[in-house]
Amino acid sequence: MASDGGKKQFWKRSGAKVPGSIQHVYGAQHPPFDPLLHGTLVKPGSKPPTTPVKLKKVSTFQEFESNTSDAWDPGDDDDELLAIAAENLNTEVVMETAHKVIENHSKLQEQHKFQEEHLQEEKQVESAELASIACGDNRLVKSISEGHTSSSSDNASENTSMQRSQSLPQTSTPPLVSGMADCNTSVTPALTEREASRLDKFKLLLAGPNTDLEELRKLSWSGIPKRVRPIAWKLLSGYLPANVDRRESTLQRKRKEYFAFVEQYYDSRNDENHQDTYRQIHIDIPRMSPEVLRLQPKVTEIFERILFIWAIRHPASGYVQGINDLVTPFFVVFVCEYIGEEEVENFDVSSLPEEVLQNIEADSYWCMSKLLDGIQDNYTFAQPGIQKKVKMLEELVSRIDEQVHRHLDQHEVKYLQFAFRWMNNLLMREVPLRCTIRLWDTYQSEPEGFSHFHLYVCAAFLVRWRKEILEEKDFQELLIFLQNLPTVHWGNEEISVLLAEAYRLKFAFADAPNHYKK
């Protein structure tokens, strides 16, 4: 265990603040407040709940399976699950079965990594061949790093694709039913049979005159195909109505309403009572991700307007550091609606028509507002929502993995020092943006996904690193590790396993908050 003197020397040498802390800036009306400097997590006299209460009891395997949809790929695990499908399950059986599924996924992942180490050259060739196939195009490339090189017979198709990335889209209004990019106008990797099947299910569901939102949530839980994600997110967030005929008029009305706010409020950003808010927004935007996107002046301008208008219209919280991150996934997803399969990090946003940029800006504002409506107590004065969630996370981890909890306690590591950011930024600083977008597919499909379910995701995320945590025997190294978790290479597979484990924890503990208490 590190001594107090050792910790003080560490902070003095590094010139840094305590790992896990961030600068919290509230609206101009709020004085600075740092929860790490306060001895209590909640107001005196109030006792935070130990764990969230599950809204609906799930008593049969059929209901459990229907809630998870296809969270796990079909495979050998299905036989074991189906064998007990007709029985009523208790918590122990569910935990054991789900644990086996997750364990099998982990073993498969380890096998894949082992094969990659020994067959790196072969896999590069195979990946290059797969990446070169799009909409019937069978071009070959020498390696992934050299990019796509077209053959002489495909020059016309390649030129069309290159021009698309530099030119304006043919339409300035989003497709209201499908929200899908045209595969024939961009180079896209071939879909697997399962991916194509899932895409067809989404297309069929979205093609009707009234979208079944409950069915859309079930289908979206295990991920939304990129081509239909923009329209699916707008529906899941409650921004668009289920009725197709009402969508265009709703979009026109909400976009007009947003820019009326801009005209009314944005010029006041230089007023004395709003200067602090605008200045902090201007400072925080360069911290966005991805890096190339945040450096574009047009993107900075759009984000400044979105965040300032939201702060002015929500005086109870004003602007708080971390809210700037919550715009990014919506903005990136809605930009992808107009650029096909091109990577948004490499796309010049200013090349889009002004009307398209305005549509993206207004849609991002309203969807972010819908999200924040459900977690606004995270950002009011003293951020009581986050304090409660961190306390609940500590209680949950102490029951699901007492050894990890005791190890952190022995080395005087406080949950606020690392988990405050997990709650404040919804894990956006802990995983790549592509993983955040996949995570939000599920969050928008879960009841209270950004608040209730996020708690279990954070618990599963912490325990995921138990081996590395238990190997660290030093206070400083523990905090540095928890602040810089090695997730840079994570993808959909890791997020799917994390979500499956989080659902297992939710199913086990939401109905039994005192299940593992001593």
Image: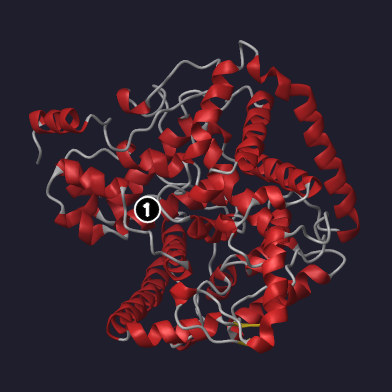
Q: Quadrant of residue 207?
A: bottom right
Q: Residue furthest front?
A: 152
**Residue 319: percent from left, percent from top:** 56, 27
| Quadrant in which the N terminus is drawn | top left
Q: Nearer the viewer, residue 278 or 441?
A: 278
Give the amino acid type for the residue marked by disc 1 in the picture: Ala
Q: Quadrant of residue 37?
A: top left
Q: Nearer the viewer, residue 248 or 77?
A: 248
Q: Nearer the viewer, residue 195 or 289?
A: 289
Q: Residue furthest top?
A: 272
Vertical arrangement, residue 446 with respect to residue 128, above or below: above
Task: Report the residue at 44% width, 88% height from top.
Answer: 76
**Residue 167: percent from left, percent from top:** 74, 59
Q: Nearer the viewer, residue 509 or 166?
A: 166
Mark 1 secondary-structure assignment: helix
Task: Report the residue at 47% width, 82% height from top.
Answer: 127
Could you tell me if residue 39 is visible in this image? no
Left or right, residue 358 beside residue 117: right
Label 1 sits on residue: 459
Could you tell me if residue 237 is visible in this image? yes
Vertical arrangement, residue 430 with respect to residue 156, above or below: above
Q: Quadrant of residue 67?
A: bottom right
Vertical arrangement, residue 507 with respect to residue 219, above or below: above
Left or right, residue 195 beside residue 116: right
Label tally? 1
Task: Report the residue at 70% width, 18% height from top.
Answer: 268
**Residue 205: percent from left, percent from top:** 76, 71
